[in-house]
Image (cartoon, grey):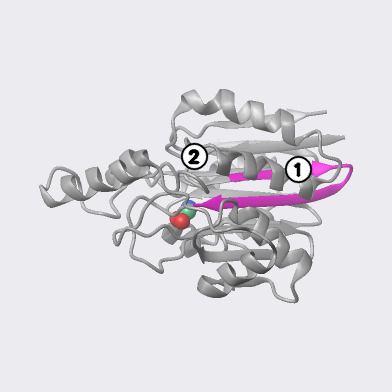
Amino acid sequence: MKIIVLHGGVSNKPELMGKVEEYAEIAIEKSEPLEAVVEAVRLMEDDPLFNAGTGSNIRIDGSIQMDAAVIVPGDFGAVINIEKVKNPVLVARDVMLKSPHMILAGDGAVKFARKMGYESYDPSTKKAMEKRDRILNRLKNGEIPEYYHPEFFKEFLGDTVGAVAFFDGKYAAAVSTGGTGLTLRGRVGDSPIPGAGIFAGEKGAMVATGIGEEIVRRMLSIRVYSKIGKGRIEDICRQEIESFGDIPTGIIAVANGKPCAISNLSMPHAIVLR
Ligand code: GLY
C-alpha cells in the first residue's frame, strides 16, 4: 500500500490544487517513501508558483535564505538559511544520508552543497521581488496591518511546501520554504525544526505550514504525533489547527495508514493512494 500527501502552502492559491495533484502522481511512482517525498518537494521547489526553491520569498535586506528538512523514523537532515542553491530539499537529504551531521546552517550549508555538486543558483523571480516591494510599500504607507498580524499573513504568506508518505509500513516526510512574507536575515521558522514543522516516527509522519514562530511555540508536529491512537488522525489535526484561531496554519499527516490535510485557510493539497 502506498499513500502520499502533498501541500503547497497555507494561504497559497486554491487554483494550484491541480499542480499539486500532478506532482503527487509523479512522486508516488518512486519505490521508497523518502525518495517520494523528496521528489514531491523538489517538483514544487522548481515551480515558481510556490514559496520554496525558485520563487522563494525575499527578505527585508533583499537576500533569499531557505530552510528544508527530511525525516524518517530515527533519522533527520536539515539545512537552515541556505542560499544560492536550486533545491534545498536535496541538500537536506544529503545532510542526512551523506554527512555525519543532522543540521547544517548558513555558509556551512552552502559549502556542503557545493561539495555535494550543487552549483550556484539564483532562486529569485520577478514576482517575488515585486511581492517584497509591494509589502514594504504598503507597510510604509500604513495600508496593511503590522507584520505578524493574522490579516497580514492572510495576504502575504504563501507559505512552504511539504510531503508525507507511507509506503508498505514505512514513513517519511520532507519540507522546504522561503520563509514567511518578509523577515529579517537570519530568521528561522518551523520547517527545519524537528517536532515543530516536521516529524516522523514509527506511528506516522507530518508536516506543518504557517507562521513559523507560532508553530514552534506550540511544537505542532510532535503534538499531533503524540496524540496518534487517541482518535482519528483527521480529528486530531483539526483540533490542533483550531487552536491557532485565525492565524493561518495547516498540516498534512499520515498515521496508521490514514492520510489527512487540514488547514484554516486555503491550502492546495493532494492525497494519492495506490
Ligand atoms: N512556515 C515556514 C516559516 O515560518 O518559515
Task: Please give left or right for residue 142 compared with residue 248 in the image.
Answer: left
Pointer 1 residue Cβ closer than 8 Å to ligand 1: no
Q: Residue at x 53, y 31 (%)?
A: 268
User: How busy is the neighbourhood of tag 1: few (under 14 within 10 Å), some, or many (20 plus)?
Assistant: many
Rounded to the nearest whole Å, what is the CA distance between mark 2 and mark 1? 18 Å
User: How busy is the neighbourhood of tag 2: few (under 14 within 10 Å), some, or many (20 plus)?
Assistant: many
Task: Examine the residues drawn in magenta and state their main secondary structure.
Answer: strand
Q: Residue at x 60, y 30 (%)?
A: 20
Residue holding disc 1: 36
The answer to whether 87 is drawn above or below residue 27 in the figure is below
Q: Which one is earlier in the sequence, the residue at label 2 or at label 1? A: 1
* Disc 1 residue type (three-letter): Ala
* Magenta extent: 162-177
**250 in the magenta segment:** no
Instruction: Measuring from the top left, give residue 2's x and y in whole percent.
Output: 83, 35
Q: Which quadrant: the N terminus?
A: top right
* Disc 2 residue type (three-letter): Phe
The answer to whether 260 is drawn above or below residue 58 in the figure is above
Task: Please give left or right for residue 29 compared with residue 57 in the image.
Answer: right
Q: Which quadrant: the C terminus?
A: top right
Q: Quadrant of residue 115?
A: bottom right
**172 in the magenta segment:** yes
Q: Residue at x 89, y 42 (%)?
A: 168
Q: Are marks 2 and 1 in contact (CB under 8 Å)?
A: no
Q: Nearer the viewer, residue 223 or 181?
A: 181
Q: Quadrant of residue 43?
A: top right
Instruction: Measuring from the top left, give residue 185's x and y in whole percent.
Output: 36, 66
Task: Please give left or right for residue 198 compared with residue 76 in the image.
Answer: left
